[in-house]
Amino acid sequence: MDHPEITNRWPGLCFGCSPANPRGLRLRFWRSEQGCFTRYAIPEHLCGFDKVAHGGIIATLLDEVSAWTVIACLGRLGVTREISIRYLRPVPTGIELKVAGQVISHDGRSAIVRASVAPAGAPAHEVLAESTSTWALPKLSSIARMAGLDEPALREYLQSMGPG
């Protein structure tokens, strides 16, 4: 199945997703039946032990895909309130990973997202790490103030992506 890419023109320098951050991960995201996903090969310089990804980078990948899942499914920007991560197996550097998220529940003020990291193309049972996160869904004006962005521009940004 062809998965449409989520257009990312984030105006800031987010470490995870901004195409403008030269030191960031520059993640790209695609819509899926359940939410969204990204593909990324963690470079060796982001290791913990040699050839094994640093746990903080894995946490960043899970948090980013969860944020973009909220955008893709709910058409909202959220703020991580809490994230719980289970590291199941070592995550190797230098191989393509698929990091996927799905909204488990939401009520207009918050959302719960489940995400996972697995080798790209691996069966579902080969999950290397997984998370459950709770997201606050504040008013767009609050997000704009927090991010130092113009609210109308931020609204236009969200509308350009639209929920899946």
Image: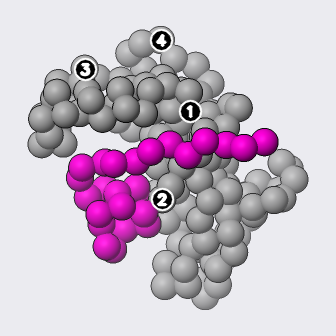
Most extreme residue toward the bottom is: 50
Q: Amino acid at mark 3?
A: Lys
Residue appearing at x 67%, y 43% in the figure: 3
Most extreme residue toward the top is: 107
Residue appearing at x 36%, y 61% in the figure: 19
- Give percent across and percent down for residue 40: 59, 65
Cα gap from disc 4 to disc 1, whole angstroms? 12 Å
Cα gap from disc 3 to disc 1, whole angstroms? 19 Å
Label 4: how many Cα within 10 Å (few below 14, some 14–19, many 20+): few
- Quadrant position of residue 104: top right
Q: Which residues are magenta?
A: 1-26
Cα gap from disc 3 to disc 4, whole angstroms? 14 Å
Decide which of tag 3 and tag 2 comes sooner along the chain. Answer: 2
Q: Secondary structure at mark 1?
A: strand
- Quadrant position of residue 88: bottom right
Q: Amino acid at mark 2?
A: Leu
Q: Amino acid at mark 4?
A: Asp
